[in-house]
Image (cartoon, helix red, strand yellow):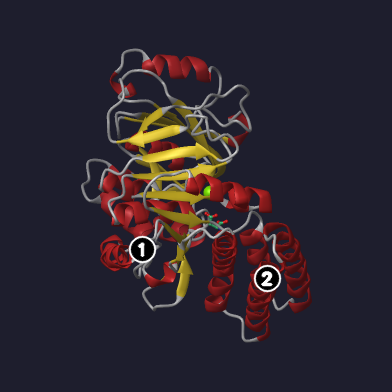
């Protein structure tokens, strides 16, 4: 079995949605098709939710009405027959009645998460009905039946697997199983999600849960590139990556993949293939556990919005347990640390989630003097076992030239070197 995931732009226009039906049909064997919301929808739902939380009902209604119009014209082009036009109408009105019902009530965070789930719920229904119109046998399997996260928002892979396996095998004679990306239930059994861009993660979790042959992530670019195509001209797609390399790149800025996607696939050694819906013949990128030939630089990614924190303390000198106490502060604020460097009297580390920065700073003050630099960028240089190669750091520092480097991290893994610079030097 394979898992095929199609992102927002792949389902964002009626002709694209028809195209993915072709791609699904062209894939042999049984498959699970994971869909995102139509492009722009989740952003709009976020905007509606923000207006509602701020008590701005009129603004929320304006956005809702525009979104509804968008779906009205979408179904007009998607369905050919009058009877399916009517079915499309029914789906759209049902969803928008529900959205307005959420908006009319006491809108809280729970309502907000339900609102965000509507994008994937509607896209999968519209696609399912499109297949029905074409008399293609398929089943819609709601992600809320099997996808769950625990009290720390971590997906419960084993439970997902226990629920999903019997569901999938009960669907005998069904080759196409459609489900929603992104959405799940939390430990209170409420509707929740896997964070923005989470449909990739859904696909990989499903792939791991059913031990799929392969997970395919279909987007609008021909694989993972060796640099950010929005900034660097003439980037090239990378044909093969290891799980570790792909994880580093996704985490440190490659926008093509949700950063957690690789984790479940790697756990059960399920290959992840990145493909382009606009150019299905393009080879794309295959991510596997196989080690590629060591030695060369493969790709560079950059992650903005990084905050660097420096803690300087003479108490650190020859002391043990100091770092543990520092890390505990971050742990207590559920804030993860990306890079870390230490000297005998100081430690520098970076975080990308500055939500709890004020209280983190406050607590760190008891250890020594604190310095905070915002607007930093991590540049991550990736390649199989590059840190074991001679001259790698020399090449990197030569390329950096006069750029002031705030931190360097090398040796944590053999396949990446990261440097921290001020954002203005990123390009
Ligand atoms: N629709 C969700 C988002 O826009 C999930 C996804 O597309 O992966 O973040
Ligand atoms: Mg995405």
Give SS at disc 1. helix
| Mark 2 lies on residue | 83
Q: Nearer the viewer, residue 220 or 60?
A: 220
On the image, the x and y values in percent for residue 242 come to 33, 33
The reply to whether the residue tagged 2 has its Cβ within 8 angstroms of ligand 1 is no
Residue appearing at x 71%, y 64% in the figure: 71
Residue 230 visible within the image = yes
On the image, the x and y values in percent for residue 255 come to 53, 42
The reply to whether the residue tagged 1 has its Cβ within 8 angstroms of ligand 1 is no
- Compared to residue 249, the image places residue 136 above or below, namely below
Give SS at disc 2. helix
Residue appearing at x 51%, y 17% in the figure: 399
* Mark 2 residue crowding within 10 angstroms, few (<14) / some (14–19) / many (20+): few
Residue appearing at x 65%, y 77% in the figure: 99
Q: Is residue 158 left or right of residue 54?
A: left
| Mark 1 lies on residue | 332
Residue 60 found in image quarter? bottom right
- Compared to residue 86, the image places residue 206 above or below, namely above
């Amino acid at each position: 079995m394979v898992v095929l995931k199609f992102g927002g732009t792949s389902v964002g226009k009626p002709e694209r949605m028809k195209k993915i039906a072709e791609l699904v049909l062209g894939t042999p064997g049984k498959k699970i098709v994971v869909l995102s919301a139509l492009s722009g929808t989740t952003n709009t739902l976020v905007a509606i939710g923000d207006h509602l939380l701020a008590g701005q009902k009129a603004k929320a209604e304006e956005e809702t009405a525009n979104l509804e119009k968008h779906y009205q014209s979408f179904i007009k082009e998607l369905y050919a027959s009058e009877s399916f036009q009517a079915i499309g109408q029914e789906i759209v009105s049902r969803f928008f009645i529900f959205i307005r019902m959420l908006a009319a009530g006491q809108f809280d965070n729970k309502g907000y998460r339900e609102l965000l789930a509507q994008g994937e719920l509607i896209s999968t229904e519209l696609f399912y009905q499109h297949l029905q119109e074409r008399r293609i046998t398929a089943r819609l399997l709601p992600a809320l039946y099997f996808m769950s996260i625990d009290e720390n928002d971590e997906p419960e892979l084993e439970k997902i697997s226990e629920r999903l396996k019997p569901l999938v095998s009960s669907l005998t004679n069904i080759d196409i199983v459609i489900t929603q990306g992104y959405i799940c239930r939390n430990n209170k059994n409420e509707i929740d999600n896997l964070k923005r861009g989470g449909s990739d993660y859904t696909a990989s979790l499903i792939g791991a849960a059913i031990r799929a042959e392969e997970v395919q992530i279909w987007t609008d670019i021909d694989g993972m590139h060796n640099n950010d195509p929005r900034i660097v001209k003439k980037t090239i797609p990378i044909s093969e990556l290891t799980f570790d390399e792909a994880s580093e790149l996704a985490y440190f800025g490659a926008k093509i993949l949700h950063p957690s996607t690789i984790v479940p696939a790697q756990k059960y050694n399920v290959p992840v293939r990145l493909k382009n819906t606009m150019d299905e013949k393009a080879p794309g990128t295959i991510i596997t556990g196989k080690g590629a030939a060591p030695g060369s630089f493969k790709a560079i990614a950059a992650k903005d919005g990084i905050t660097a924190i420096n803690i300087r303390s003479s108490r650190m000198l020859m002391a043990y347990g100091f770092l543990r106490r520092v890390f505990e502060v971050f742990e207590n604020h559920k804030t993860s640390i990306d890079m870390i460097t230490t000297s005998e009297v100081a430690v520098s580390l970076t975080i990308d989630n500055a939500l709890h920065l004020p209280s983190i700073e406050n607590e760190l003050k008891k250890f020594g003097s604190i310095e905070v630099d915002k607007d930093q960028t991590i540049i991550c240089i990736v390649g199989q076992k590059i840190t074991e190669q001679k001259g790698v750091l020399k090449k990197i520092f030569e390329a950096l030239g006069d750029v002031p480097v705030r931190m360097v991290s090398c040796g944590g893994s053999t396949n990446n070197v990261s440097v921290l610079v001020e954002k203005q030097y990123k390009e």
